[in-house]
Amino acid sequence: MGKIQLKSVTKAFGGVKVIPNLDLDIEDGEFVVFVGPSGCGKSTLLRLIAGLEDMTSGTILIDGKDATNLPPAQRRLAMVFQSYALYPHMSVRKNIAFPLMMAKMDKAEMNRRVENAAKILNLADYIDRRPGQLSGGQRQRVAIGRAIVREPAAFLFDEPLSNLDAALRVGMRLEISELHQRLKTTMIYVTHDQVEAMTMADKIVVLRAGNIEQVGSPLELYSRPRNTFVAGFIGSPKMNLMSGAHARQHDAATVGVRPEHMDLSTSDGLWRGEVKVAEHLGSDTFLHVDSKDHEEPLTVRANGEFQVKAGDVVYMTPQADKMHRFDDKGLAIG
Amino acid sequence: MARQVSRQRKIGMTILAWFVGFLIFFPILWTFLTSFKTELTAISIPPQFLFFDWTTENYVNIQAQANYFHFMMNSIYLALGSTVLGLIFAIPAAWAMAFSPTKRTKDVLLWMLSTKMLPAVGVYIPIYLLFINLGLLDSRLGLIIVLFLINLPIMVWMLYTYFKEIPVDILEAARMDGATLRQEITQILAPMAVPGIASTVLLNVILAWNEAFWTLNLTTSNAAPLTAFIASFSSPQGNFYATLSAASMLAIAPILIVGWFSQKQLVRGLTFGAVK
Amino acid sequence: MATQHSQKLARSMMAPSVIALLIWMAVPLAMTLYYSTLGYSLYNPISTPFVGIENYTYFLTDPTFIAALTNTMVLVVGVLVITIGGGILLALLLDQDIYGVNIVRLLVIAPFFVMPTVAALVWKNMMMNPVYGVIGQSMSAIGLAPIDWMTDVPLLSIILIVAWQWLPFATLILLTSLQSLSSDQKEAAEMDGAGALSIFWYITLPHMSRAITVVILIQTIFLLSIFAEILVTTNGGPGAQSTNITYLVYQQAISFGDIGAASAGGIVAVILANIVAIFLIKAIGKNLDA
């Protein structure tokens, strides 16, 4: 079981309120991602759950029981740190076994669990090496191994992939998702990378300045962003947000349309523009277009190859049913 | 770049570097050689470089005539005593500063450093009179305390810079893994801190061994270490070069070896972590 | 974790060191200050009348003081010039690709570990003795008149001995700093068309400037209190030609038994050292933020 509830949680460092007031429910077995720009309080929130920071006020329940004043070790949570935080003077085996040794587990069960974790994570060949002799990806696996042997109520991941290179990151992303499928344990995952959030999460929590901007499944957030911040943060490339005349035409303060929701043509369409930069990826074509109708250049995505180059004239037509409308407070309308 | 040129350059640089190295090392080498000469060969003109009758009689003589062993034991007592005392005080202080820093930590560190800059003569007179009154003059205990105090700032600083490098993440991971404070210290922190503590010990032993203001001014014979023993050769009692050389070699050899092993840490300790 | 509890614990862990150093610094210094206002002679310790600033006027107007002050400055500056200049050259040399660089390093840093009394006596007798010393014999061998170092140029002799001891320190620190210079920077400068000399002047030297500052300041602290080297070689003489402030205070106290004047001298030395210390603390404190 791993149901975690935060009730009216606040946290202040000195006089600075990092988390003004926050409520959140995390269901058992869910993969929850906290996402937001740096400094949004997502790591602090994770550390509050872990018990590594004291809350200023509020309550945290784990499986219905008050854990507000429990020390980290007694919360039955395991954490994977951004820096991996492996013990440099211990072998991989001892690193993974350490939490079990602390729990005074018997030798046979401990060995069974360590061997099992090593097998799941493909670490069997390195089990007697020190962390210093491992690559970044292997260290990451050891850190995960150390977390899973405890069979915790929930896993906490603090930007675990940010120290890996791009190719490895994609691989580890898959491995963590597979691990979740297999263990079905609650996972809370902190990242600033919305792609990680979109690909891994059951539920995304978008944070800004310590406040929850929106909670929902990746597709909910994508198709129905609650406000302009979420609209701009989720989705890549970013949604085009336009104010002024076009917004007024749609009875809104701001309208948004995603790059993939515009039809492109070289002959006719609603908006005329001149291509500034064309990025041909083969599978997609991204165009950055200057248009007299808009102050900001627009980003447009075409499926497959679209034969234009910088300086060419293109016409763009937004798909009417994919337009997002926001009021003057930035909140979604309708 | 032409390989030939860079190879020639390498050989040229090598010769130059070895020549300069030899020149700087020469006084020590010469002392070493002289220590195996008879007093007569030691002052022969022209000087004998390698081809003389090597003898170890000087080494035997210093012990027999001057009771060298007594002074060496004092040096060891002072160096180790002040170091152990220093560790007892410095480890907790550096620990607290590295792991629970406050706004004032930096000021405390700098203030400690500033005590190191107090010239010895500024406090020499009262300490001297105090030692007379307390009967600490020429006692090992008194000197151990003084050496401990003058090196304490360096020890705190050095340990602080080492402890600072231990990532806080690891301590938190241990806490999450269920380690108690005791286990955190004995199983995680201690093994990681040992290299830093070892370097600090080495540097402090070197500094205490070679300290030559307080050891000369607060001792006469009982507690006199090797610095004072060697200084006694300065009295005009004739030129006993070979004996002086043998005594000198014995006085510097242990620390020279320790020093060679700890050259990296030396930079760090003596610059208070400003150059790593 | 910064909780109330750990703050209190931290303070109690620091307390012993802070208190020990506070006592070590404040008590004797206050006593020195107090003694410096007394007419206090070791030969007549019963009567110690208050004399105000008389000890200071006596100490500061003593021609020996002026000589000692000058000697202290010459000693510090002389050693600094030799060790910094030599240290930069040596660091550049040891940074080159050479065979057996580790052994050369050991040879170069060795003098630093030699205790001051040994260094001074070895140089005085076996190197600088006009008759039997290696330097004297070498000079005679090539037909030059040997120099009687300790009598003719006592201060220079001490400068050379001390410089020999401190050259390794400067070299080691400058070399460490030199090796932390990324080769990218040098290569970028090379691509920009800079020659070896320009690279040294515009890239290497500025990079080392902080290390040089640190060397200057730390050495100055130690050089201001040179003592053993003078005690075992020249005894400050001939006359006061190689007496520095530290040695002068020692003489006042031990040879003349004048505790009052010696204390005044000690205070003067503290003030001198403080001037240097302020700069050093600033330099190191700045580094602490980085």
Image: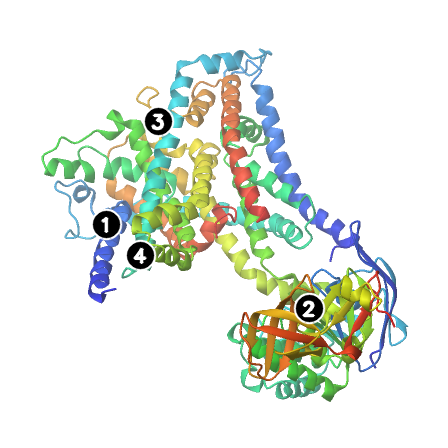
Q: Are marks 4 and 3 in contact (CB under 8 Å)?
A: no
Task: Give SS at disc 1.
Answer: helix
Q: Position of residue C133 (x, y in %)?
A: 20, 37
Q: Chain of mark 1?
A: B
- Residue C124's place in the image compared with A101, above or below, is above
Identify the amino acid type marked 3: Asn
Q: As drawn, which residue projects farthest toward the left?
A: C143
- Residue C58's place in the image compared with C208, above or below, is above
Give C281 or B262, whichever is nearer the viewer.
Answer: C281
Q: Position of residue C3 (x, y in %)?
A: 77, 55
* Residue where numbered disc 1 is placed: B33
* Residue where numbered disc 2 is placed: A192
**Mark 1 burial class by Cα count in 10 Å: few <14, some 14-19, many 20+:** many
* Residue where numbered disc 4 is placed: C96
In terms of image quadrants, where is residue B165? bottom right
Q: Chain of mark 2?
A: A
Quadrant housing the N terminus of chain C: bottom right
Q: What whole-number distance in Å separates the C-alpha atoms at marks 3 and 1?
A: 28 Å
Which of discs 4 and 3 lies nearer the camera? The answer is 4
Residue at 18% x, 35% y is C136
Q: Position of residue B30 (x, y in %)?
A: 24, 47
* Residue where numbered disc 3 is placed: C235
Task: Give SS at disc 4.
Answer: loop
**Mark 2 burial class by Cα count in 10 Å: few <14, some 14-19, many 20+:** many
